[in-house]
Image: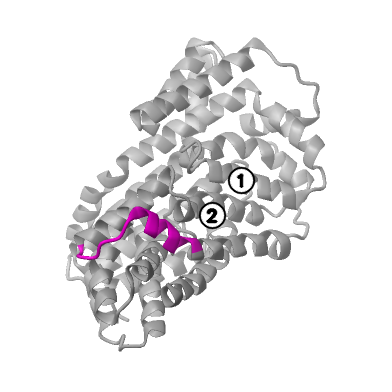
């Protein structure tokens, strides 16, 4: 249990729970991992800095999305959505949360923009959440569900990529399986996430939760229009055109950076946002998403330390030494190992190649079927994505819900999503490994 992955993840989690800034918590955890693996602090720092480039594209994407989101709010078009929701969903909190989860699901498959919709959709709704006394922890669980469950269960968009990675990595490790079979294997773990969502919405966070009213800049100015008389203007039409063009560019080029940059440029060219307001808008966008960008960069460096020092392989090898031949115990331990790895690395997609290379030989030796092996690998990779302070599945919801400074990343996003999704994933993941 003194493995560098285990100790550093515990250090990161404890510091985060004590409300130490998540960026500092990851830096300290990375230092602990490096020291435990025999590196000096300068060596660990160099590896961390060298590995930060692994998430450079993601970090820049988030910054550009923040700027584009502020521009959209500046146009006032989000006021229409808020006003419509007030009239339709007044007093229907559960339906609103399920609707948010549904919209988030579409972002993974039908319109694969991942977290790009959050800084655009959620900040203008904060005023509505407060009026309806909605517990924002319920909103966080709804958003995280939509960011995770579709890629676990649906072979389209990011889901097709995820299932393809599992199939390819299993094949590379000597176990053949079709992508369609991976999809079938992941249905049972996916059901666990549905159970977690329903518990969160209808049991855990159904009570009123009042937050102090505040007025914070352009985001709330747009939100405050929900009770005002709104008229559709030509600038609103141009804003919609900019959003559509940004989406098309992103899908064609497969680049979130180019898509968001297209939207930003068009908002200036269409004069929806005056050039003289450019510096203010950019500053607000960076303020909204800059923290996430830096956390992703540092998390990438931390993951590099864990990989290059061999700490992950050591963890799996030490776990296999005590597995025995009981399939139930083996399945539970393998999922716990996956949880620790993903909590540290913060990326389910990036974790799969590591887990598959280490788990496939174990599963083959013990007698797990390819379906059961796929379920274990997929679930182990997804575990920790919800609840990890460094995961975009938690950072994205926090960025939107904390636009007015009233939502805590750890206690209001990470802890609720960890409890509601990781526990069911372990239970249903083990069930899948036993029955498949």
Q: Closest to the observer: 215 or 135?
A: 135
5 left or right of 213 in image: left
Q: Secondary structure at mark 2?
A: helix
Q: Residue at x 49, y 65 (%)?
A: 189
CA–CA distance between discs 2 and 1? 22 Å
Where is residue 178? Give x, y as percent.
32, 56
Q: Secondary structure at mark 1?
A: helix
Where is residue 357? Give x, y as percent.
23, 65
Q: How many marks?
A: 2
Q: Residue at x 67, y 34 (%)?
A: 220
Q: Which mark is residue 140?
A: none
Reading the image, the residue beneath label 2 is 409
Q: Closest to the observer: 346 or 372?
A: 372
- The magenta stretch spans which residues? 173-187
The answer to whether residue 434 is above or below residue 373 is below
For residue 211, say whether it is visible. Answer: no
Q: Residue at x 33, y 72 (%)?
A: 369
> Could you say which quadrant of the image residue 118 lies in?
top right
Taking the magenta stretch, the answer to whether it contains residue 243 is: no
Reading the image, the residue beneath label 1 is 102
């Amino acid at each position: 249990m003194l493995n560098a992955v285990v100790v550093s993840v515990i250090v990161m989690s404890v510091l985060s729970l004590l409300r130490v800034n998540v960026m500092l918590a990851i830096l300290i955890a990375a230092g602990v991992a490096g020291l435990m693996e025999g590196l000096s602090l300068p060596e660990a720092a160099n590896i961390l800095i060298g590995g930060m480039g692994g998430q450079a594209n993601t970090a820049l994407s988030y910054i550009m999305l923040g700027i584009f989101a502020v521009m959209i709010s500046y146009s006032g078009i989000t006021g229409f959505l808020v006003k419509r929701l007030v009239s339709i969903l007044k007093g229907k909190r559960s339906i609103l949360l399920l609707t948010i989860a549904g919209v988030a699901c579409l972002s993974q498959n039908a319109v694969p923009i991942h977290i790009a919709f959050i800084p655009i959709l959620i900040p203008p709704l904060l005023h509505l959440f407060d009026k309806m006394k909605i517990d924002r922890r319920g909103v966080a669980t709804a958003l995280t569900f939509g960011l995770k469950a579709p890629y676990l269960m649906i072979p389209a968009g990011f889901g097709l990529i995820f299932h393809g990675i599992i199939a390819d990595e299993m094949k590379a490790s000597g176990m053949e399986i079709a992508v369609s079979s991976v999809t079938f294997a992941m249905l049972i773990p996916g059901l666990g996430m549905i159970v977690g969502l329903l518990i969160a919405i209808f049991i855990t966070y159904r009570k009123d939760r009042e937050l102090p009213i505040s007025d914070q800049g352009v985001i709330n100015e747009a939100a405050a229009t929900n009770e005002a008389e709104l008229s559709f203007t030509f600038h609103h039409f141009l804003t919609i055109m900019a959003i559509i063009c940004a989406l098309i560019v992103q899908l064609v080029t497969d680049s979130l950076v180019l898509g968001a940059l297209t939207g930003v440029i068009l908002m200036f060219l269409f004069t929806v946002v005056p050039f003289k307001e450019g510096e203010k808008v950019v500053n607000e966008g960076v303020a909204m998403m800059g923290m996430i960008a830096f956390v992703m960069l540092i998390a990438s460096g931390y993951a590099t330390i864990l990989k290059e020092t061999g700490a992950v392989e050591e963890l799996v090898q030490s776990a296999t030494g005590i597995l025995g031949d009981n399939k139930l115990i083996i399945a539970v331990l393998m999922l716990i190992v996956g949880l620790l790895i993903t909590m540290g690395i913060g990326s389910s997609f990036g974790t799969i190649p590591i887990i598959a290379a280490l788990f496939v030989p174990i599963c083959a030796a013990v007698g797990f079927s390819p379906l059961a092996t796929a379920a274990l690998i997929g679930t182990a990779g997804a575990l920790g994505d919800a609840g990890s302070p460094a995961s975009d599945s938690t950072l994205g919801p926090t960025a939107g819900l904390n636009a007015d400074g009233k939502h805590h990343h750890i206690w209001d996003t990470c802890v609720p999503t960890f409890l509601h999704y990781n526990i069911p994933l372990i239970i249903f993941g083990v069930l899948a490994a036993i029955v498949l």
